[in-house]
């Protein structure tokens, strides 16, 4: 009988691991609470009415159709009996010989309950759609009332966190408003609209070289985003953002892009966790004391050059390939090999014709970086249909200054 490899999570890591085991003499059981694989890097485009959710997500069963050794189950994994090698799910236990945990991460509000309650995270499709609805509803609300202070608060949009997600979100939101919504709301006084990007430190895109950090900040200013450094959010009640130091910003919308942490399930399994709640793994990606368990992607804590590997898609994908290869090696009686990360570089877009890129030590900005960003994201999207539709969508929006998905739908 072939050994069973259970994979928890059909994100970047889990999906790649499942595919890498396609020809292996193992039975693969892939478990996820959703029936789709989500391309998270484009979530901000759903939140800003540029794309529909189905253009950045694809059903797992469709992606892995034809993989004979695979069984997909849409279930929530709630725990595990590690000694008995059994996962606990809402639909009963799942036995395994090898386990790959590709659980991903969740939004880290750093204990700010008021922000978690009244602000928006950007991790799930539902959150992106909720942001889109909320932003568009704020514009409708601003057209109805006569109180100027209320109108200004409705039209003030605060994005917190100067990492790639915050930068991309703030740039896209400002463009949605200034290129598209101004046409929908001809009575709108654009001076009432503010998009703020709040960053607690003194820099944006901290992992990028200084030249790119400065270029990103300049471009955001150019796109009418008010970038504020040293701005630490302490409280938000849905109408007022209170900063450390006491300043209060009236704002009806707060989008939290300031932190990520690993899925809480890792800690619940009783495994040792490091920074951001990520499960500590050995260089082979195995859990200490449990050689049959591998952890990949955002959920795994592994250092390279004294720094933890970033919570990014290429790390998850490469780790998944190593974990799958190590399982095949073990089945064949060979020792597992250590993981080595090959950094493909980093990219962030700030909107139309504007991006910053660092690829193999070469840094560049502006239109060339934006074209590279477009190509890389189109290539990485899963499914030819999605690639084609997204490309057409972007081309249409580029030439006609449009955002087709600006519907307020019921939540
Ligand atoms: C808004 C946003 C923008 C980003 N932009 C970029 C970018 O531009 N470039 C980049 O490289 N990275 C980006 N990232 C990070 C990147 O998406 C992650 O690093 C990557 O998704 C990690 O892959 P993963 O397989 O570890 O987890 P994920 O892709 O998050 O997948 C985890 C899966 O596990 C499932 N799951 C979790 N717990 C359970 C459970 N208990 N039971 C069942 N299923 C479960 C989830 O439903 C999910 O499908 C971005 C992330 C976000 C949120």
Image (cartoon, grey):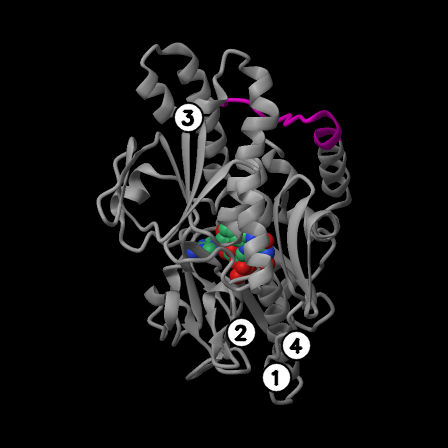
In the displayed structure image, the side of residue 25 where residue 53 appears, left or right? left
Crowding near the residue tagged with mark 1, few <14, some 14–19, many ≥20 C-alpha atoms within 10 Å: some
Crowding near the residue tagged with mark 3, few <14, some 14–19, many ≥20 C-alpha atoms within 10 Å: many
Crowding near the residue tagged with mark 4, few <14, some 14–19, many ≥20 C-alpha atoms within 10 Å: some
214 vs 176: above or below: below
| Discs 4, 2 touching: Cβ within 8 Å | no
Queried on whether the Cβ of the residue with tag 1 lies below 8 angstroms from ligand 1, the answer reads no
Range covered by the magenta-colored residues: 396-411
Q: Is residue 297 visible?
A: yes
Precedes in sequence: disc 2 or disc 1: 2
Q: Is residue 14 visible?
A: no
Which residue does the image show at 66% across and 26% down from the upper left?
Answer: 402
Which residue does the image show at 44% across and 72% down from the upper left?
Answer: 85
Give whichever of 288, 299 is nearer the camera.
Answer: 299
Say which mark, if any, is on residue 325: 4
Residues at marks 3 and 2, CA–CA distance in whole angstroms: 52 Å
Say which mark, if any, is on residue 330: 1
Residue at mark 2: 98
Residue at mark 3: 155
Residues at marks 3 and 4, CA–CA distance in whole angstroms: 52 Å
């Amino acid at each position: 009988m072939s050994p069973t490899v259970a994979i928890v999570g059909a994100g970047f890591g889990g999906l790649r691991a499942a595919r890498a085991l396609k020809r292996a003499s193992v039975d693969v059981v892939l478990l996820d609470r959703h029936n789709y694989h989500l391309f998270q890097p484009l979530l901000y485009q759903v939140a800003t009415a540029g794309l529909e959710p189905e253009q950045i997500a694809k059903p797992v069963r469709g992606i892995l159709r034809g993989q004979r050794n695979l069984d997909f189950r849409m279930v929530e994994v709630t725990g595990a009996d590690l000694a008995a090698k059994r996962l606990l799910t809402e639909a009963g236990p799942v036995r395994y010989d090898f386990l790959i945990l590709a659980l991903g991460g969740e939004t880290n509000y750093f204990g700010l309950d008021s922000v978690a309650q009244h602000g928006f995270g950007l991790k799930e499709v539902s959150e992106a759609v909720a942001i889109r609805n909320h932003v568009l509803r704020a514009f409708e609300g601003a057209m109805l009332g006569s109180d100027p202070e209320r109108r200004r608060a409705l039209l003030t949009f605060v994005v917190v966190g100067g990492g790639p997600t915050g930068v991309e979100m703030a740039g896209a939101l400002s463009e949605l408003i200034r290129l598209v919504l101004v046409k929908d709301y001809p009575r709108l006084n654009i001076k009432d609209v503010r998009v703020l990007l709040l960053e607690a430190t003194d820099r944006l895109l901290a992992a990028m070289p200084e030249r790119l950090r400065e270029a990103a900040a300049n471009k955001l200013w150019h796109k009418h985003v008010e970038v504020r450094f040293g701005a630490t959010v302490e409280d938000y009640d849905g109408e007022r953002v209170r900063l450390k130091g006491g300043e209060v910003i009236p704002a009806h919308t707060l989008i939290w892009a300031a932190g990520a942490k690993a899925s809480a399930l890792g800690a619940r399994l009783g495994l040792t966790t490091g920074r951001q709640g990520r499960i500590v793994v050995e260089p082979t990606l195995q859990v200490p004391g449990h050689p049959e368990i591998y952890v990949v992607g955002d959920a795994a804590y592994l250092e390279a050059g004294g720094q933890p590997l970033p919570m990014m898609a290429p790390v998850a994908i490469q780790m998944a390939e190593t974990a799958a290869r190590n399982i095949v090696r073990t089945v064949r009686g060979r020792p597992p090999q250590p993981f080595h990360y090959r950094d493909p570089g980093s990219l962030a877009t700030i909107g139309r014709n504007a991006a910053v890129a660092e690829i193999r030590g070469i840094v560049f900005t502006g239109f060339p970086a934006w074209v590279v960003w477009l190509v890389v994201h189109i290539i990485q999207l899963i499914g030819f249909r999605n690639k084609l539709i997204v490309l057409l969508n972007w081309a249409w929006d580029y030439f006609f200054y449009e955002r087709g998905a600006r519907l307020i739908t019921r939540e």
